[in-house]
Image (cartoon, rainbow, N blue to C red):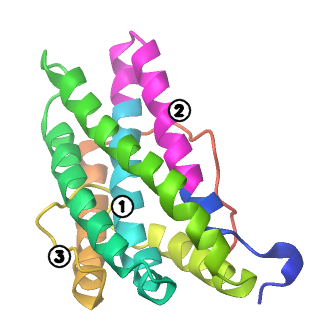
Amino acid sequence: MATASNYLEVTHEIKLDHDNVRDLFERYKQTTDLKQKALIANTLIREMAVHGDAEEVSVYNDYGALGLGDTASHNKEEHADIKKLVYDADATRLTKAEYDSILERAVTAFLTHAKEEEDEQHPLIRQKVTPEDNDRIARAFLKARTLVPTRPHPWAPQTGGIAQKAAGMQGAFHDKVVETVEGRQFVDLKYQHPAQF
């Protein structure tokens, strides 16, 4: 059980994901090595996919109690659009001339949404939740990150409920198989969530 001294803060954990995407995209733009670009692109796609689904099956479920029910619906709509763009990047070969612009569209949509969350929603969450609830939501988000698919599935349920969780578990297993068969590799993330939560 968490004590006041080790409470987690959900907006901090969410922003870590946002900051990792920002950092990865800067790294992607700065390298000219094709193998390194592929590793960074794989990691960007994974992080954007995991983040969106994890928010939907955890954090957004608490938005209604915070008076942010309409905001959760708006966020899910934006996530659906982002997932389609991330899927396009995942389905396009890195060697295609248009790959950089396809990936940039996905990252730009993700970061535009992230900034909206950070500027408009996170201050409200910090204001409205108790430290105990904040910790509970943060831990639910971190747990969800370990259970959701690691690749985009834009046609899967976006409800945040049991249907999305069930589809997510199946998708996560499928993604693990695909990544293993493809030999997909990733780069390390600059920002880390707590190892134990």
Q: Residue at x 30, y 80 (%)?
A: 160
Relative to residue 112, is residue 140 drawn left or right? Answer: right
Q: What residue is shown at x 14% (from left), y 41% (from top)?
A: 88
Pointers 3 and 2 in contact (C-beta within 8 Å): no
Amino acid, disc 2: Asp
Considering only vertical position in the picture, is 48 above or below 95? Answer: below
Q: Position of residue 2 (x, y in %)?
A: 78, 84
| Kind of element beneath mark 3 | loop
The quarter of the image holding the N terminus is: bottom right
Which secondary structure, mark 2? helix
| Residue type beneath disc 1 | Gly
How far is mark 2 from mark 1, CA to CA?
Answer: 17 Å
Q: Is residue 51 magenta?
A: no
Q: Position of residue 159 (x, y in %)?
A: 24, 80
Quadrant position of residue 155: bottom left
According to the picture, the residue beneath numbered tag 3 turns out to be 157
Q: Is residue 23 magenta?
A: yes
Return the x and y of residue 62 as percentages of the image width and height.
Answer: 47, 84
Alpha-carbon distance for marks 1 and 3?
13 Å
Residue that numbered label 1 is attached to:
52
Q: In the image, what residue type sits under mark 3?
A: Pro
Sooner in the amino-acid sequence: mark 2 or mark 1: 2
Q: Quadrant of the C terminus?
A: bottom right
| For marks 1 and 3 on the same chain, the one whose residue lies earlier in the sequence | 1
| Residue under numbered circle 2 | 23
- Count residues near mark 1 (Cα–Cα under 10 Å), then give few for <14, some for 14-19, many for 20+: many
Q: Is residue 9 above or below residue 180?
A: below
- Tell me the residue at 47%/75% (across/down): 59
